[in-house]
Image (cartoon, rainbow, N blue to C red):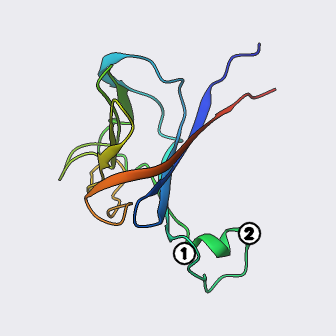
Amino acid sequence: GDEIVETVLLIKDTRGYIFGALAMRPWAETSRYYGLGEGMVFKCGPAGMRSSQSSALGTLGQFQRFGWSRKNSMFQTATKDALGLGGGGAGYALWLDGNLRSGTSMPCDTYNNTCLASSSKFEVAEIELWGLQLA
């Protein structure tokens, strides 16, 4: 079918840090966590920072991905007021408020990640959500 399944969330914060997530299920309003372990969160560091690796992402900085740790299944959740990815430990790997203007990023058990943004509390400068449709 033509159903969008996976989504890629890209965020640039007001300090120029680029980060985001690959979510394996469509976003839906629920009070529970859902999703699959094939997803991930990632960070690229500040825009314009040169990477030691020569790649298309080199101009974004040093790409780091954090896959499922298998410690819990807190992949994604969404309400009318917020959306979140990851959980356990210090908080969400990535949390955005309902107006998509601010958020938090904390180390979490789901992905064993470090802070993805420029700091644990950040303001959004740009945001994109890409839907992926598998053939």
Image x and y of residue 65, in percent: 50, 60
Which image quadrant: the N terminus? Answer: top right
| Residue appearing at x 59%, y 76% in the figure | 48
Q: Which residue is mark 1?
A: 62
| In-front residue for pair 105/109 | 105
Task: Answer with the quarter of the image where residue 88 lies.
Answer: top left
| Residue appearing at x 33%, y 58% in the figure | 112
Image x and y of residue 35, in percent: 45, 29
Q: Amino acid at mark 1?
A: Gln
From this viewpoint, which residue is outermost toward the right?
135
From this viewpoint, which residue is outermost toward the top?
1
Which image quadrant: the C terminus? Answer: top right
Q: Which residue is mark 2?
A: 56
Q: Considering only vertical position in the picture, is 51 above or below 85?
A: below
Task: Answer with the quarter of the image where residue 79 lies.
Answer: top left
Q: Decide: few, some or many residues near mark 1? Use Cα within 10 Å; few <14, some 14-19, many ≥20.
A: some
Q: Amino acid at mark 2?
A: Ala
From this viewpoint, which residue is outermost toward the bottom?
52
| Residue appearing at x 48%, y 33% in the figure | 36
Q: How many marks?
A: 2
| In-front residue for pair 40/73 | 40
Q: Decide: few, some or many residues near mark 2? Use Cα within 10 Å; few <14, some 14-19, many ≥20.
A: few
Image position of 80 (left or right of 65): left
Image position of 35 (left or right of 99): right
